[in-house]
Image: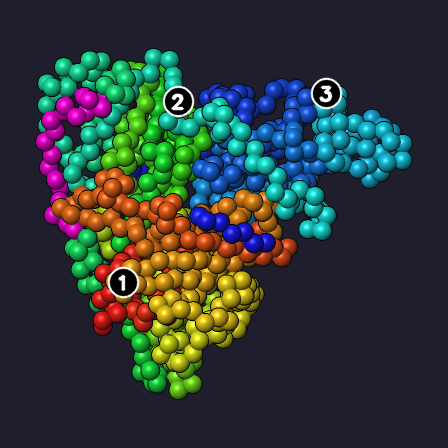
Amino acid sequence: MNTHVKITQSEPADLSRRSFLVGSAAAGLALGYSAVPGLLGADQAFAATSSFDPSVWYSIAPDGIVTITCGKADMGQHIASTMAQIICEELGASWKDMRVQLASNDPKFNDPVLGAQITGGSWSTMMNFDAMSRAGAAGRIALTEAAAAAMGVQAGDLVVRDSTITNPKSKKSMTFAEIVKSGKATKTFTPDELKAIKLKSPDQYTMIGVAVPQLDIPSKTNGTAKYGIDVMLPGMVHGALVTPPVRYGATVKSVDDSAAKKVPGFIKAVTLDDKTGTTTGWVVAVANTYANAKKAAAALKVDYDGGPNAKLSSQSLFDEAKRLQGLSDSGQFFVKDGDPAAALGTAAKVLEAEYTTNINIHAPMEPMNATAEFKGDILHIYSGNQFATRSGAIAAGAAGIDPKFVVMHQMWLGGGFGRRLDADMMVPAVQAAKAVGKPVKVIFTRENDMTMDFSRPLTYQKIKAGVDGDGKLVALSHDVVSAWPTQRWGIPDFLSPSVDKKGPLDAFTVNGADFFYTVPNHYVRAIKNEMAHNATPSGQLRSVAPGWTFWAIESMIDEIAAAAGKDPAQFRIELLDGKGDNAGGAQRLRNTLLAAMGLAGYGTKQLPKGEGMGVACVSSQERKTASWTACVAHVAVAPSGEVKVKKLTVATDVGTQVNPDGIRAQVEGAALWGMSLALLEKATLKDGGIEQTNFDTYTPLRMSQLPEVAVTVIANGEPATGVGEPAVTVVAPAIGNAVFNASGARVRGLPITAEAVKAAMKA
């Protein structure tokens, strides 16, 4: 398929940070968990008592309406509709009867695979497809058996379609509504029985693979869908932040609120005492309106101790990264195959290169926000977040209560991209609400949002590669130095054991470096930059590690091909031979590369002087949950070094596609984000603080800069893969390689600037 676009009050025994990050909401209490507004409106009950609930994930009402409860954050990727479509396929419901709502943090909604409510990694569809399919099939079986009993026939004689169960012989039928009203649908399934259900084969699908309308669009366009920023509660007041000039580590020495007291409606200035360590040096001005809260915040005079990071800069972090990489005993091994040192010693040619990426900011359109309300012993949090399990624990830690006394009201997200995996927005709301005894809504300004972002970390990578006399890649040694965002979460299960047994490492900083190319001698070392880890506490930005690991790998593969005198695309095809552990994955990746090349016309046309095409192919994100994506970038490079991207051609293997339109939208958006990161986006640290405060200084891709984007989707009936992030990772190296082919300039740092290209042209 192708598309072209122009584009809680008792004190627990342990209030340590670790206790709140690791222990969370495992015990279920009757806390009045409620649905979050979807098409159904705010806080509507999950299911009426007369409804039929085949699964925790959906309910069928007496009127036949099927309400899906999505346990994933919906931030515009329409994952709620995707879950509904998967269930609808096996259930046999009519799409017009489907509705969606978002789950609370009730423990019953913990992800059956991950054990936590988390949305990221492009995992949602691939990890939930089977479970949602079986939930739908179980409902169909239960309804069919109830209808068969009512009709006096065998269940196998009936056909289910469009929310109706029909006997083709007698022409008798019963709707889902009629069956539910009868109360006869009572069959339940054990886990083993669910596992034994025979699901449809791809050739039997009538809903999967169909571009049905996304269920959340009407409410989002008519204004009834509620985002966190929309929350209004009786008696609610507002909080505005005063944040320190240092990103992390500052403390408040004193607060002078004499001028703030002159602001109408001012209530109190609350200095945060955050035992979870999520925030440092923050003050919240609380007032009757947001406007007055902002005025009061501006009037506060706060004296800070800048802390240990007050003098650090981006250059400090890069210098430290290089120092750490130069130490032979630093870091832990992520990959350790063969003996690269020996192979490099006998190689016919050895190449060495350094690759860098700068700090990058999420900047979703809906800034961070949260509303907190204490109802007796229960803390209610209203916010859009991507990690309800962890966020609930942090909110509890901020309040000094047990996580089981926190109710999370999940809202629609006005952009997430990994930013809302963190819960810093909840801390000021919780502590302000506790201090003033009223519900408090806190909204970050854009400046708060940018300077206090849990950003994509600055990275430094060094690669050494060796080829033999035939130009074959025989060794590759790859060091990756960065902050470790996942380790910051304090959740041991999210870390991976190192292959050299030196302890756990943050694989989310090196994923992708364990590629599907066959290289007999291959080392990957993950090195934690403690300085960066502390000064710029990093988070997960759309694409995570493959956003920088593939930048280095796919650039180096091109450099090796050039040194060997081979076409870079053909060189990749030869490396993707599927030997050993690369069987299967290499073939799928090779197919996507060939598809992108074919659609782009790579190698089939003579390009004007100053223009070039570059290729890259990736297996984002994790090796065990890979998505196969390739890109051909067509660029023009001016003598000034300015790079204009004329076209991006992306091929992706999704296995089983649920909604074709949704997939194409995700791939297009990811590709354009990748282009923005490749050419434009850069944040810098100076005196411990992020210098860029708004879109005048942090400049993502604008509409006027969009190239043509062509997408081809390979759907081959294999298990569904993720599509939200992989295309982010493939675009930057494809552009960098195209720049080289157009101008001879090899640029190894992101973003690729005109100055860097011009300098490389002269080198």
Expressed as whole percent of the image width and height from the top left, the position of residue 623 reads 47, 59
Q: Which residue is mark 1?
A: 641
SS at circle 1:
loop
Residue 434 lies, with reference to residue 530, above or below; the image says above
How far apart in space, not on screen, are marks 3 and 2 (Cα)? Answer: 35 Å
Label whose residue precedes the other's in the sequence (2 or 1) = 2
Outermost residue, front direction? 608
x and y, in percent, of residue 306 in the image: 12, 40
Quadrant occupied by the C terminus: bottom left
Which numbered disc, 3 or 2, marks the residue closer to the eye? 2
CA gap between label 1 and label 3 equals 70 Å
- Residue hosting label 3: 181
Give me the residue at 23% from left, 44% from top: 697
Secondary structure of residue under mark 3: helix
Q: Residues within 10 Å of mark 1 (few under 14, many from 20)?
A: many
Q: CA distance from mark 2 to mark 1?
A: 48 Å
Secondary structure found at label 2 = loop
To which residue does mark 2 refer? 231
Amino acid type assigned to the residue bearing label 2 in the image: Val
Residue type at numbered disc 1: Gly
How far from the left and from the top, in percent, is residue 589? 52, 64
Residues rendered magenta in the picture: 293-313
Q: Nearer the viewer, residue 81 or 23?
A: 81
Q: Residue at x 45, y 57 (%)?
A: 648
